[in-house]
Image (spheres, grey):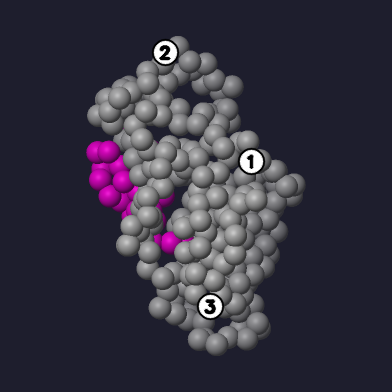
Amino acid sequence: MYTIQGYSKVKTLEEAYELNQKRSSTIIGGGMWLRLGNRSIGTAIDMSDLGLNQIEETETEFVIGAMTSLRDIECHAGLHQYFNGMMKEAMKGIVGTQFRNTATIGGSIYQRFGFSDPLTALLALDTTVEMYAGGMIPLDKFVIMDYDNDVLVRIHIKKDRTQAAYQSFRNAKTDFPVLTAAVSRRDGKLKVVIGARPGRAVVAKCPDVLASAPTEEDVKKFSGRVAEMVSFGTNMRASAEYRKILAEVLVKRAIMEILEQTSPEATGGVCK
């Protein structure tokens, strides 16, 4: 629960940035994640008039405004087609459709929640965050940075013919994930990301190179070695030992899914 003492619907990014320098100010985005804690907000900064709720596709990248809803990303035909349905898979398990219609990608990424499905998925891709003051920062660097009062403006995802797959496990359909895993492959090289450890998502250090035409047993052994190189914690949803077992299973599933993919265009529909 939170309370708001003042409200400002800003007209420029500069105005949003200046207001956000006050410790009591907060960018509200969709307002959904603010409900996770108890706090008093001096000034709620609303950026809904800045045109940051669009997804643009160019020849080289997808550019997603910070105010874009998770549902819009889930249903975007270009993202779905190019990344083999990965982004839809990463979004569809987040609470429910009504929630995803309101929650924004900016809030999901800026807060760097351990349970964030979008963070895990985007880390597996060539993703850069565009900050108002800090400029362009690779997501794998941004995720380990300390929080500051900068403003996240857009997210950039390169179109580099990456194949990708996303997996998650939940105790209940609309609950936060127990564990998440995303795998991408470009030029034969795999990138593995593990999230909901329950800490922030991390890029796993792959122990070796997987064979170009691996058997299912090869993939299982590789996934097991990856799980050994990631640290896990215990919370109310699962123990560290259970998460380690899940990691091996989810990474294997994601890799097997990628091996079955033919090209970034070989997917079906988007949202029903």
Residue 6 bears which disc, if any?
2
Q: Kindly identify the residue that appears in the image at 55 percent across and 87 percent down.
A: 213
User: Where in the figure is residue 169, as x and y percent of width and height?
Assistant: 68, 55
Task: Give how far apart the Cα atoms at labels 3 and 1 are.
Answer: 30 Å
**Is residue 179 among the parts visible in the rendering?**
yes
Q: Residue at x 65, y 82 (%)?
A: 216
Q: Nearest to the eye among marks 1 and 2: give it.
A: 1
Residue in the picture at 48% in, 57% down: 79
Label 1 neighbourhood size at 10 Å, few (<14), some (14-19), many (20+)? few
Judging from the image, what secondary structure is the residue with disc 3 in?
loop
Give the labeled residue for mark 1: 97
* Residue type for callout 1: Thr
Mark 3 closeness class: few <14, some 14–19, many ≥20 residues within 10 Å: few
What residue is shown at x 42% (from left), y 39% (from top)? 53
Q: Nearer the viewer, residue 236 or 168?
A: 168
Query: If you read the primary sequence from the N terminus, does the residue marked by circle 3 or circle 1 appear first?
Result: 1
Q: Residues within 10 Å of mark 2 (few under 14, many from 20)?
A: few
User: Where's residue 95, x and y in %?
Assistant: 65, 41
Residue topped by disc 3: 262
In the picture, the quarter occupied by the N terminus is: top right
Say left or right for 239 vs 232. Answer: right
Instruction: Give how far across and how far down residue 178 sits, in percent.
Output: 66, 51
Asked if the magenta segment contains residue 188, the reply would be: no
